[in-house]
Every structure is written in structure tokens, then in C-alpha cells.
Image (cartoon, rainbow, N blue to C red):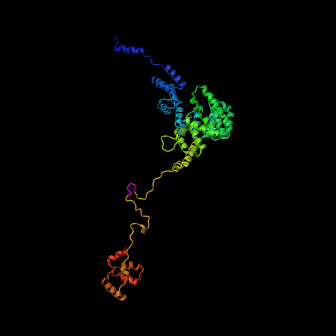
Amino acid sequence: MPPKGKDRQRAAASTQQPPPSLEELFGSLSKHIEESEFEKAVKVADQVLSINRGDEDALRCKVVALIKADDIDNALSTIRSSKSPPPDFSFFEAYCLYRNNKIDEALELLKRQERNSATMILESQILFRSGKMDACIDIYQNLPKPKVESLEINSAASLVAAGRASEVKRTLEALGVKATNSFELAFNTACSLIELEKYTEAEQLLLKARRIGQEALFSDNVPEDEIQIELAPIAVQLAYVQQKQEAVEAYTDIIKQDMADEVSLSVAVNNLIALRGPRDVSDGLKKLDRLKDKEKQNFHLAPGLENKLSPKQKESIYVNRVLLLLHANKMDQSKAKAKRKRKRKPKYPKGFDPANPGPPPDPERWLPKRERSSYRPKRKDKRAAQVRGSQGSVARDKHETGAASNTSNTKSNQATTSKGAPQNAVAEASKPSSSKSRKKSRN
């Protein structure tokens, strides 16, 4: 006989395991973070917060896990929605603002915090992104050297970006480190040698950096594809220092494989276009389109590139694209990119309403009157110039008619005297003119 409904519920309740304790949840949370399983860590932190809403450790673990998972927006909303956040949350908030490229807000928030190594490093990164390299270097030089990890790597990168590549060697000597201590430091030092045009030394150091990076990443059990992505900047710089046919092949392979990060890919595309020159213009424009922001119609770099590339690198990409457009005879696009003109409102005459412009203007208004289609020449009164019979008889007739029309308007006399005939003859001839002839004379 099958068990009844209540018996089944009791059996299910007896088989259910009790909810995990806080100690178990924190153990699971620590395990997920150590294994870089940040999404799982967020879920476990939410479980802890559902049991103990104000637990600062669980809240801090959730924020750090969200930042590590690149979920910056949720991390920022978690920080701001906390009713009583821990004191160090203002630092996390500044970091999230920095990651969202809200540089001014992040810098203003850092100024209100206690100055320590963490805040100084974050401030130097903000200044680096803002292009204020000298201020960034000053902060690195004032940092406590034994307590800061990778200080020499960031210092070398800042010096190269600031145009002070000649100081890199002296800085490393002052810190007591060698360029081959890590593949990142070897790469940054090689970049300083490139700036100093010491290409042979730079190539040798880049080869060492690639070997050190492969060994270090392989020992950390990093997958092969991720190793290629991590070492892509070294491959790009190696191709640059060679500057031969091998360089073109290396850039092409990097672009085809699509195994590089977006910054290295943009550098490879830009260097390949610079090496080719006016050849393969259409292919160069297609490769540059991979770097653009897909949501905008005109060419703008993708947000990730806009935030990570230096002003000099961005300028080089835009200049190369303008040159390609010029070679492709696309003058309109190149002019629009080289100089964006501000749109101005058209100026209208006083009292003109563009919504009700009225009838269209005469298209022949700028032509001389004689060339217009509506022009009609004036008809001359030929009767005044006709002379019939003898002069005496004409004068007698006019005298007689002049007595009858004694009230003739003097204005007609003035109008006719201006036509160039002798005044006496014209005056006598104008007296018998009718009102119709006067109207003609006015015309």
C-alpha cells in the first residue's frame, strides 16, 4: 500500500539536509575566491547576507568578487545601497568610478580619504589615464618601496609614457632590481629602449621577456590560448623593432588569429597600416573598422580603447585613417575627420518667418531689366515728330486748338520738354495731347 500524503511529506522532511551554517558558508566563500570562481562567491555571499544582513565581511567579499568578475556597475550599486558601509568602501567606490572612466569623481573621492599606499597607487593610475605623467611619477617616487608590489613595473611604464625613457635604467638601479625580474618589467624596459632608438638591445630584451613569460605562465598552469593573449604585446613590439617583411607577416598573423587583447590588436593594426603605406587601402580601412565603436555611425574608437590607449596612440590611429581616406579619394570623410565644423543656424532677414516664407522669389531678379522675360520696351509717340504741310499752317492750327484747350496741364509740358526736341516746337506740339497721351508720357 503506498504511503499517504502526510507520510510522504514527513519522509521528504527527514531526508532534507539542514541549511549550512555561517562557518560553512564562509569556508565555501573563501574557497571560491581562491579558485577565482567569483560568480559563485557572489551567490554564497548573498546567502550569508540573507542570514546576517549587516555582516561586513560577507559584504566586502561580495564587492571584491564583483570587481574581480568585472561587474563594476553591480559592485558600485552594492556599495551605495549599503546602509552602514565599512570605512574602506569609499576606496572601492573610487576604484569603481575609475574603472567606469569617471576620473574626476574618483579623484575627488580619493582626496577625502586617508593617504596610504593603496590610495596613492590608485591616484597614480588615475593620473596616468588622465595623461598627467609627471604627477604620476612623483607619486610612485614617494611610495614606500618595500611595501608596494610591482612598483618598478608601473614606474617604468609611467616614465616611458611621460617621454622620460632615459630615466628608466637609473630608476631600476635605484630600486635595486633587474630588467629581467619579470616579463612585464622586461617588456617596459624594452619599450624605453625603443624610444631611445636602441632597437638591437630592445629586440634581445623582448626575446628574453617572451621566454620568461612563457615559463612563468606555464608554471602557473595557464592555458595555452591565454598565454598567447598575455604575451601578445611582446609579439607586437618584436614585430615593430624588426621592421622588415617579417614584421608585416607577424602583424598579419596576430590580426588573423585574433588572440591578442584589444590594445595589442589596435597597435598591430595601426603599425601594419603604417608599414604598408598607400597599398591595400581598402583592407586597411576594414581592419580599422574592427577598432571602432559599433554603436556610433562615424568612426570613434571603442570605449575600451578610448580609455586604455594613450593620447599619442589614439592620434596616430586617427591620422592613419585620414591618410587612408585621402588615398581612397574619400575626401568628404577625411575632411570631416580632420576638422569637424560646428553647425550654425542660418541667418534670416529681419521679419522673415522661415515657417511661412511666402511666394518664392523671382528667379530673374538679378538679371538686368532688358534681359528679363517680362520686359516690354516703351512705345514712343510718333505723332509729335510728324510734320505735315507747311510750317505756317501747322503753327496756325496749333494756335487755334491751343485757344480751345487753354486749360492744358503744365506737367505734360514739363514732361515733353525733357525729350530733347527744341522747346518751342515741343511746347506747341504738347498742347493738343489728350489725357491718354499724358498717361503714356508718365509711363
Does residue 400 show up?
Answer: yes
In the image, residue 343 above or below residue 442 = above
Check the picture and name the quadrant holding the N terminus: top left
Locate residue 5 relative to residue 335 in the image: left or right. Answer: left
Question: Where residue 21 appears, x then y in whole percent?
Answer: 48, 19
Question: Where residue 224 appears, x then y in whole percent?
Answer: 57, 28
| Extent of the magenta region | 353-357
Q: Residue at point 40% right, 15% down? A: 13
Question: Where residue 188 appears, x then y in whole percent?
Answer: 63, 35
The reply to whether the magenta stretch includes residue 54 is no
Q: Quadrant of residue 223?
A: top right
Check the picture and name the quadrant holding the C terminus: bottom left
- Which residue is more in the foreground, 98 or 169? 169
Main SS, magenta region, reads: loop
In the picture as drawn, the residue positioned furthest to the left comes out as: 404
Does residue 143 show up?
Answer: no
Locate residue 15 relative to residue 116 in the image: left or right. Answer: left
Question: Where residue 414 appears, x then y in whole percent?
Answer: 39, 79
